[in-house]
Image: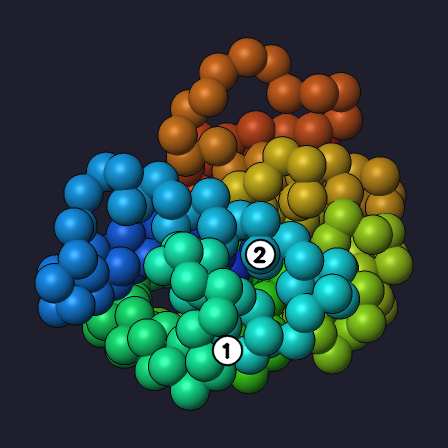
């Protein structure tokens, strides 16, 4: 059955989240008079990963997750809400000043103009909507589904199937493209879609059975033609 739709992850797939996050936290730490070095970056990323997992699992609200990231990073579990909010807001301001799409995104969307496109993300809908508008690509996607409104998150098959329903296509006619092998490509495969792992870093090795791997979105149109046969 011919492929007719592509669902996309946002962060580190369409949007250079890691680059913006790195630039944003370094600028924020410098402004706060704190060390802006590799150790601080490593701690920031470790805290973000752990606290974000609790947010997507439903253990924290979005605001609680931001406060928790500030408290954990600063090593101050008693930091009052208003000060944690202000600290995180300073980071967000500098992070948003650094927002950019990867340069291979718009050419890939142009080359795949005959497909229906949608977004499925584990971040909040309000945030991803604003991000896609700011990046000038919101109108490229007919649907935008996020875990906070959906009530389920990748890699749960229900999240992928809800996004296929929103595209109006059965899973076997849809490819899912994301940077995470576990959450994105394997989750999509297990839900009956074509899982495409965008391995920008080139971590090497063969992808698991049933998962396709591309190093850049420039390789996606050719891959989807081959999948369609
Ligand atoms: Mg991602």
C-alpha span from label 2 to label 1: 17 Å
- Mark toward the viewer: 2 or 1: 2
Image point (37%, 81%), residue name: 83
What is the secondary structure assignment of the residue under circle 2? helix
Mark 2, residues whose alpha carbon is within 10 Å: few (<14), some, or many (≥20)?
Answer: many
Comparing 141 with 44, the one in front is: 44
Residue 74's disc number: none
* Left or right: residue 91 compared with residue 128: left
* Left or right: residue 187 compared with residue 117: right
Q: Dividing the picture into quarters, in which one does residue 168 lie?
A: bottom right
- Answer yes or no: disc 1 within 8 Å of ligand 1: no
Image point (48%, 70%), residue name: 78
At which x and y percent is residue 7?
A: 65, 57
Residue farthest to the bottom, as pictured: 82
Asked if residue 103 shows in the view, the reply is no
At which x and y percent is residue 96?
A: 30, 73
Residue that label 2 marks? 51
* Left or right: residue 2 compared with residue 88: right
Residue that label 1 marks? 127
At which x and y percent is residue 31?
A: 12, 68
Number of marks: 2
Q: If you read the primary sequence from the N terminus, does the residue marked by circle 2 or circle 1 appear first?
A: 2
Comparing 209 with 80, the one in front is: 80
At which x and y percent is residue 48?
A: 48, 54
| Quadrant housing the C terminus | top right
């Amino acid at each position: 059955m011919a492929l007719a739709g592509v669902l996309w992850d946002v962060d580190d797939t369409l949007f250079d989240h890691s680059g913006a996050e790195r630039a944003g936290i370094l600028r924020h730490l410098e402004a706060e008079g704190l060390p802006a070095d590799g150790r601080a970056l490593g701690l920031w990323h470790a805290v973000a990963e752990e606290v974000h997992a609790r947010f997507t699992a439903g253990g924290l609200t979005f605001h609680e997750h931001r406060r928790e990231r500030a408290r954990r990073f600063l090593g101050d579990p008693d930091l009052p809400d208003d000060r944690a909010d202000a600290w995180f807001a300073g980071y967000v301001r500098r992070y948003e000043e650094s927002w950019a799409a990867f340069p291979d995104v718009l050419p890939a969307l142009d080359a795949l103009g005959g497909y229906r496109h949608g977004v499925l993300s584990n971040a909040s809908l309000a945030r991803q909507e604003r991000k896609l508008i700011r990046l000038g690509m919101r109108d490229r996607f007919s649907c935008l589904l996020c875990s906070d409104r959906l009530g389920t998150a990748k890699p749960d098959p229900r999240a992928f199937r809800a996004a296929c329903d929103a595209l109006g296509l059965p899973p076997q006619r849809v490819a899912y493209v994301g940077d995470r092998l576990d959450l994105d490509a394997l989750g999509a495969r297990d839900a009956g879609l074509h899982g495409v792992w965008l391995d920008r870093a080139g971590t090497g090795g063969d992808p698991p059975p049933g998962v396709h791997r591309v190093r850049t979105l420039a390789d996606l149109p050719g891959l989807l033609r081959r999948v369609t046969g």
